[in-house]
Amino acid sequence: MEEKDLFGSLDLTRSSSEDRLNPLNAVLAFCGLPNMTEPLRYSRAEVAQKTGRNGAPVWIIYKDAVYDVTKYVAEHPGGPELVTDEAGTDSTKVFHEAGHTADAYTILAKYKIGELHEEEKHYDANGKKKKIVAVKPDGQTRSCLNKVTCGLLG
Ligand code: HEM
């Protein structure tokens, strides 16, 4: 019987350079399984549908990561409503301001299911909040000095 050449028969055109360097990903790709070292990505709109209502699960966002806390809701020491009220939302501020101990953060980490798409993230790779730059429509981007000069010149 002809023996399969695991790495030789891989379609390397479909994998990234990182995949090719990581033997685990090469094996997963060979078996037609998803890349396990990359987090699953979700959009904010997708998370917004996971409100816990009508049988939907309870998902929250905390610092750009997505958590499915459906199974934790009933156990929540502050009562289930505090969590379900936030279902489907970016709960970063609320979760932080609730004054949770390190225990709560450890528990939360166990429910992580993925991350937001890169372009929807609010934090950079160092965990710092990104600066949101407001883009003004054309014609409104003149600096103050420019505006004063234009004003003086009529
Ligand atoms: C997102 C909305 C949430 C709000 C507003 C909230 C609020 C609170 C409040 C007010 C308490 C204090 C309860 C008391 O002392 O009687 C508490 C405790 C706690 N919460 Fe939450 N919580 C939220 C989500 C979560 C989630 C998602 C987890 C974990 C997956 C969690 C884990 C805990 C734990 C372990 C405690 C016990 C005290 C501690 O270790 O901080 N909470 N929460």
Image (spheres, rainbow, N blue to C red):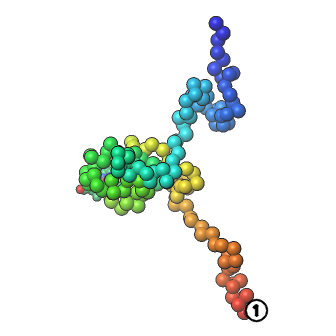
Picture quadrant where residue 138 is located: bottom right
* Whether residue 54 is situated above or below residue 33 in the rendered picture: below
Q: Return the x and y of residue 21 as percentages of the image width and height.
A: 64, 32
**Residue drawn at x 66%, y 23% as measured from the top left:** 7
Q: Which residue is mark 1?
A: 153
Residue 62 visible, this orientation = no
Q: Image check: 8 left or right of 104?
A: right
**Residue drawn at x 63%, y 69% as measured from the top left:** 135
Q: Residue furthest front?
A: 54
Check disc 1: other Cα within 10 Å, few if <14, some if 14-19, many if 20+.
Answer: few
Q: Image check: 18 left or right of 82?
A: right
Q: Return the x and y of residue 140 as percentages of the image width and height.
A: 66, 77
Q: Secondary structure at mark 1?
A: helix
* Whether residue 78 is situated above or below residue 9 in the rendered picture: below
- 37 or 52, nearer to the observer: 52
**Three-letter residue code for mark 1:** Leu
Q: Return the x and y of residue 108 as percentages of the image width and height.
A: 37, 47
**Residue drawn at x 68%, y 22% as measured from the top left:** 9
Q: Residue furthest top?
A: 1
**Residue drawn at x 64%, y 6% as measured from the top left:** 1
Residue 17 visible, this orientation = yes
